[in-house]
Image: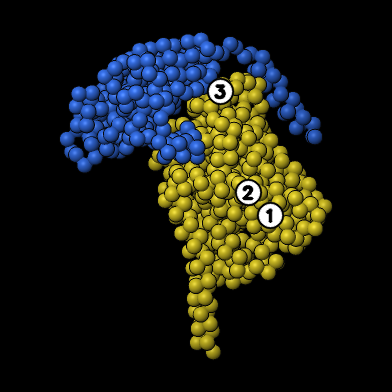
Amino acid sequence: MKRSNFHIVFILASFFFFQACQKNAPHEANLRIGQFLMTSDEVEITLSKNNKDELNKTLPYSALTAYEKLTPGIYKVEVKRNNNLLLKKKIGIGEKGNYSLILYGIPKENQSVNVETTSKKLHSIVEGEETHSANGFLPQLKVLNDEFECAKNEAKVRWIHLAAGVSEISAKAIETDKNETTSLSTLSYPMLAKDVAFTAFDQEFKWNLKGNKISTAATSLQLKPEYLYTFFVIGNQHHYLDKLEVITGKTKKKKF
Amino acid sequence: MGKKSDGKLDSLSVWALAAGGMVGGGIYTVLGVVIAVSAQWTWLSFVLTGLIAIPSAYSYVFLTNKFHEEGGAFVFLEKVNDKKMAGNLSWLLILGYVLTISVYAYAFGHYLSFAFHGDPLLMRLLAAGIIILLILLNLAGVGKLTKVEILIVSVNLLVLLALGVYGLTQWNSTQLVAGIEPRPIWSSLFGGAAIFMAYEGFQLLTYEYDKIKNPEKKFMPVLLSAVIFVVFLYVIVSVGATMIGGATSMISFKEIALSISAESAFGKTGLIIMTIAAGFATAAAINSTLFSTANLSKRIASQSELPSWFDHTNKNDVPDRSIILLGVLAGILAIIGSLSSLVEAASLAFLFTFGIVNWIAYRELNKKKWIPLLGIIIGCLVGGALIFRLIISKPIALGGILAIVLLIILGRPYVLKQKEKTKQKSKNEEK
């Protein structure tokens, strides 16, 4: 090895050694829970680690909690309705991560745990985490990554179709002052749209059922720069198939 | 470093070009795709597919040394008197290279666009721009810049190794499944299936056979050590980068996974270094693949297995039509395609090609037949898994690929026959 190459390797090795020595205790992660399982009963969600309950929430339909701190690790998540176990899954909570744990679908009476259609099972085998299956509208649990990247003068917006049984939905944003429209994708259940950046912050967001010009849900927001806005679009509990409801989650950009 | 006074490539140059050919576009684009499928077993996916790449490298070198001729799979098939298969495979191989170039351009556009907070339009413009630039450079006769490529490759390997090793020093196994569900060990088969193209780059060296110094003695150990090194590098980077970025971010930002990881580790400095490394590495990979594929097309055309239109060269002795056609096709795919689809289609093309090469080597070898056989067995397993994945997740894309293959098998003889007829007719008219 040439002398100059040796110096480069030595400097790099020293740098990594000192960086490694500076490692601190694990940084906590932030997790919020969205309860969008279509049921009139409250749903109990428990996150446990090493057989110890770390987080327990009982939430009604359409509830979205604030972010809660969690220590990194692999958690067992259990979702119960009237003490009946609907979903059970293991998930990893990483250091400094921002996550939304969402529940969606329509549970049946005396539903068994983790019921999956053959299509969902096959897609899970080959696609893993990128599976987006309707699962016959049966209950599902998913963790959304709330990390995002944006410029200092930008806000980001995304939305997810969680109205089980409802056909494709289109979304658009209309800049309040100029009436300029930005398309925000057309999605089928339970797809998540890509982030869209906004530099104009006064926006009205509208959702239409496919082929229908009249919006079935709308919300106006004054966006803040360096924030990610996630719209969870769900069915209205009392007019499920013809009205939509929008739950808005807000996440501040993580500093590196 | 580089070419020695006799104009031949020394062992270190061959090693760097082989390793760089694989890593150049590979790990930058495929990491997020494989993590989504295999999660904490991502490293095993790279090992598994590495176990196809290593025997395939052995087979490529053995056959190139045996036939003493550059040209790769096309030449091997010609030499074993399977001209029809050689023609079919050469078309498929060219398709695979076009897909590969499009993946590299896609990665180039994403990595650079991300650094400037660009929108999808900027990404597409950058992807198209780099291809146009490299088409023009090639047409001007600049072509393969071996010394520049070796320099880029060396820096690129150092940057990736540094990121991977730094990530390993931050060991926290939860990061491998951060934000996702842990996956079973067999998922590594499906993960590997999706990203096999990450290893294809080494075989471009077989097109440079006549430029390699003492190939009978040196080519085998040099190429094998390069492939083995890349397997280790992929394992280190896949684990290390995920330790820093976390699995879910590697998936969410799969197009720019390594930039996310570098920024998480070293802030803006990390992002800038990774963007420069990715930009140069992908551009070098596009250039060498475009150059080699255009020359391969010319060679195939000269053997009448492609229309003679591809045999045309400009005043700089560059196969201009091939360069333009292949570059434009790759550019269009980079603009309209999705990352997973492009990577999977390219992986399928190369799994098939490597399978054929291993099969020929198996037939031609008298000893050590187990080496190509190992490549064939694991290749069949991984290929089967990829076809199964495509049937379930992208049946239309698979249908499209099969239609193209069918078109090649059925349409190629027709196209060549028509060309021959036209040529004959014009000759008769001249008389």
The chain to which mark 3 is attached is B
- At x 76%, y 46%, the residue is B222
User: Is residue B128 something that shows in the picture?
Assistant: no
- Answer left or right for A30 relative to B195: left
* Amino acid at the residue labelled 3: Gln
Q: At numbered mark 3, what does the secondary structure look like: helix, strand or loop?
A: helix
Q: Which mark is on residue B379?
A: 2
- Image point 79% across, 31% down: which residue? A3
Please give left or right for residue B374 compared with residue A2 in the image. left
Q: Are marks 1 and 2 on the same chain?
A: yes
Q: CA distance from mark 1 to mark 2?
A: 10 Å
Q: Residue at x 80, y 50 (%)?
A: B218
- Alpha-carbon distance for marks 3 and 1? 38 Å
Where residue B390 appears, x then y in whole percent?
48, 47
Q: Colour of chain B?
A: yellow
Same chain? Circles 3 and 2: yes
Identity of the residue furthest to the bottom in this view: B431
Q: Earlier in the sequence, mark 3 or mark 2?
A: 3
- Residue at horizontal 63%, vertical 45%? B199
Which chain did the image draw in blue? A
The residue labelled by disc 3 is B175
Chain ID, mark 2: B
In-front residue for pair B387/A230: B387
Residue pointed to by mark 1: B358
